[in-house]
Image (tube, rainbow, N blue to C red):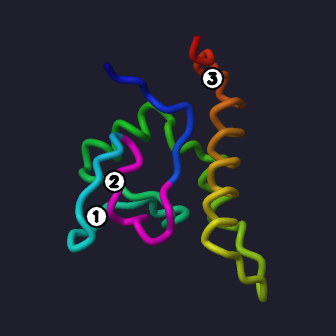
Amino acid sequence: LYAEPYAATTEQRTLRSVCRRCLLNVNAQKRFTIFCAGCKEVYYCSEACKHEAEANDDHTSLECKVLSGWHVPGKQYTSHEVNEMKLVIASICQHRKGRQAPPPPI
């Protein structure tokens, strides 16, 4: 059984260890080096996943723009706050694309 998430984000400590497209998770010793050049907040396990994400607009230009400029000078956010903001941004972007949230479990 496989279900694609409506929106997903990665904790800052594991940002480079989880592929944004396929959600492949590698151990902490390995780090992905392929990332979004615009925001540097989204990493991919391969060029193929990056191209697939770009082709399907998974990491939207709006999301990229928001992620690249959301830091407020002088403001320190907790990792929990960062994760929440990133998930909200991803959810809003999915909604704007017209993607429907999955129905609740019965």
| Mark found first going from the N terminus, 2 or 3 | 2
| Mark 1, residue position | 32
* Residue 102 percent location from the top left of the image: 58, 19
Horizontal arrangement in the rendering, residue 33 relative to residue 71 (left or right):
left
Inter-mark Cα distance, 2 to 3:
24 Å
Cβ atoms at labels 2 and 3 below 8 Å apart = no
Q: Which mark is residue 77?
A: none
Going 21% across and 69% down the picture, which residue do you hit?
30
Q: Residues within 10 Å of mark 2 (few under 14, many from 20)?
A: many
Query: Which dot, 3 or 1, sits closer to the camera?
Result: 3
Identify which amino acid the numbered label 1 is placed on.
Phe
| Mark 2, residue position | 44
Going 41% across and 39% down the picture, which residue do you hit?
53
Cβ atoms at labels 2 and 1 below 8 Å apart = yes
Q: Which mark is residue 101?
A: 3
Inter-mark Cα distance, 2 to 1:
6 Å
Q: Is residue 19 magenta?
A: yes
Q: Quadrant of residue 18?
A: bottom left
* Residue 34 percent location from the top left of the image: 31, 61
Identify which amino acid the numbered label 2 is placed on.
Tyr
Image quadrant holding the C terminus, namely top right
Inter-mark Cα distance, 3 to 1:
29 Å
Circle count: 3
Q: Residues within 10 Å of mark 3 (few under 14, many from 20)?
A: few
* Residue 87 percent location from the top left of the image: 63, 49
Horizontal arrangement in the rendering, residue 37 relative to residue 68 (left or right):
left
Going 26% across and 50% down the picture, which residue do you hit?
47
Residue extent of the magenta highlight: 10-21
Task: Give the vertical position of 106 relative to 40 (above or below).
Answer: above
Identify which amino acid the numbered label 3 is placed on.
Ala
| Mark found first going from the N terminus, 2 or 1 | 1
